[in-house]
Image: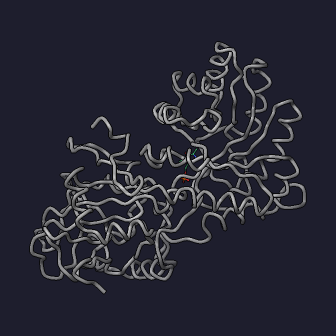
Amino acid sequence: MADLESPACEGVLPLVPRTEPWMEDLLADPETCESLIEEHGSPVNVLDFSPLARNAAELTRAAQDEGVRLSVYVASKANKALGLVDAAREAGLGVDVASFAELQQCLDAGVRGRDLIVTAAVKSHALIELALESGAVVSVDNLDELEDVSHAASAGGTPARLALRLASSDPSIPPTRFGLTTGQWDSALTGTESGTVNVEGIHFHLNAYSSDERAVVLREALPWVDRLRDAGHPVAFIDMGGGIPMSYLAHRTQWTSFWDALAEDTGGALTWRGDNLGLTDPAAARPSSQLYPYWQAPVRGEWLREVLRAPGVDGALIAQDFVARELELRCEPGRSVLDGCGMTLAKVAFRKATSDAVPLVGLHMNRTQVRSTSADFLLDPRWVRPASAGEPSEPVEAFLVGAYCVEDELILRRRLRFPNGVARGDIAAFINTGGYLMHILESASHQLPLAINVVRVGGAWARDRIDATR
Ligand SMILES: *Cc1c(COP(=O)(O)O)cnc(C)c1O
């Protein structure tokens, strides 16, 4: 399977990632990979946002098939590159911002206020003022925040455009720190100075990826829309947040085989020091909820169709409840619309073994640079060998380690097989890291600089504006 151009790297049990054509083009060009690292340092995040529009269109088309108007607001916290904001604007998508800086950057990039929603979990006065001034919708979380927003709106003389963040009261929905219940909001609104706020929508965002849970909360929100409208609020949309699922892996069978094998792996053949990666129930060979389901189905469009075809509140389907109310559906996908947009390249620094003879490959990067809240990133890297790489080692099975001075500094926690050996100057390519993996937890600990982000525009790679001053 491996040729000299692309030496192999795979898990002892392979987990082969899905790729995009732009990724294959770059991986087939080791000299360009090397020059990107030469110029920008290791690791370097490479981004091509062309799949964004296609991913979002899959959602809008699925909704349209059910007769529902869907607007997509890309969750910008999933990737900090300003190329994402440009791509969202060019595709006619909105943006969901989670901080003052994200809001300011979107406005600077020419995104209109009405195409923005502010969902920051904690909102400064400066953020609230900028949101009101720009005409963005503010998702309000609690009563203190409502007071802040309503004061700022009074002072500014323009009513705030609000979405109320809904904390579901349904017993089947896990408790949440976000939002308030319908009852809490209803009593709060009676006390709000009239003319300072317009409730234009209802907002929620759930953990995990269950279409059933989205349907449950939509069934809770729909009758509330009717009550708010009866009370005179111009409610025009329900925003169901993000958490729209995607799959990273090419093959379902590799995913299930991996978990079956891990449940049996008492000797640590598969993982670092026998880490079970949060396997909760060895009998069922299932990952815990601390781990992203790197293979899942249905995803995106098909998943959304499931939500809209779930039973509604008027004896028909949820889709029909939206149509009957002339309600718009909104969503805030991050990860699932960034599918196919990013890759992280890092250079091999050294080969060695631990004091107890476990082979290691050291990379010029640290583990916060391909990391999310998931217990591990369960995709095999691709391996690139530039002409300048040194003499490859013998075939080896090894773990990837990084630059932080801790024993547990593993880049990936699975044992990898290198049938063509490993050379100094080889490049590890982590696939599909555009959604969260490259940015959400990256740290500059040890005063190691953050990775540079390069974006492909018109066939050439250019430093993203987020790194313009570096
Ligand atoms: C993080 C977040 C999102 C994006 O979630 P994904 O899982 O990336 O789709 C959307 N909305 C809110 C409020 C969020 O906090």
Residue 13: image x %, image y %?
36, 81
Q: Is residue 402 left or right of residue 300?
A: left
Residue 233: image x %, image y %?
82, 31
Residue 401: image x %, image y %?
22, 62
Residue lying furthest bottom: 1
Above-or-below relation of 218 to 225: below
Image quarter in which the C terminus is found: top left
The residue sitting at 39% across, 68% down in the picture is 378
Above-or-below relation of 451 to 428: above
The residue sitting at 58% across, 50% down in the picture is 91
Residue lying furthest top: 155
Image quarter in which the N terminus is found: bottom left
83 or 222: which is nearer to us?
83
Residue 237: image x %, image y %?
75, 43
Q: Is residue 397 left or right of residue 216?
A: left
Q: Is residue 148 left or right of residue 453?
A: right
The residue sitting at 73% across, 49% down in the picture is 329
15 or 54: which is nearer to us?
54
| Residue 140 visible, this angle | no
Residue lying furthest front: 458
Determine the image quadrant of residue 67.
bottom right
153 or 402: which is nearer to us?
153
Determine the image quadrant of residue 361.
bottom left
Above-or-below relation of 341 to 168: below
| Residue 168 visible, this angle | yes
Q: Is residue 369 left or right of residue 89?
A: left
Above-or-below relation of 356 to 73: below
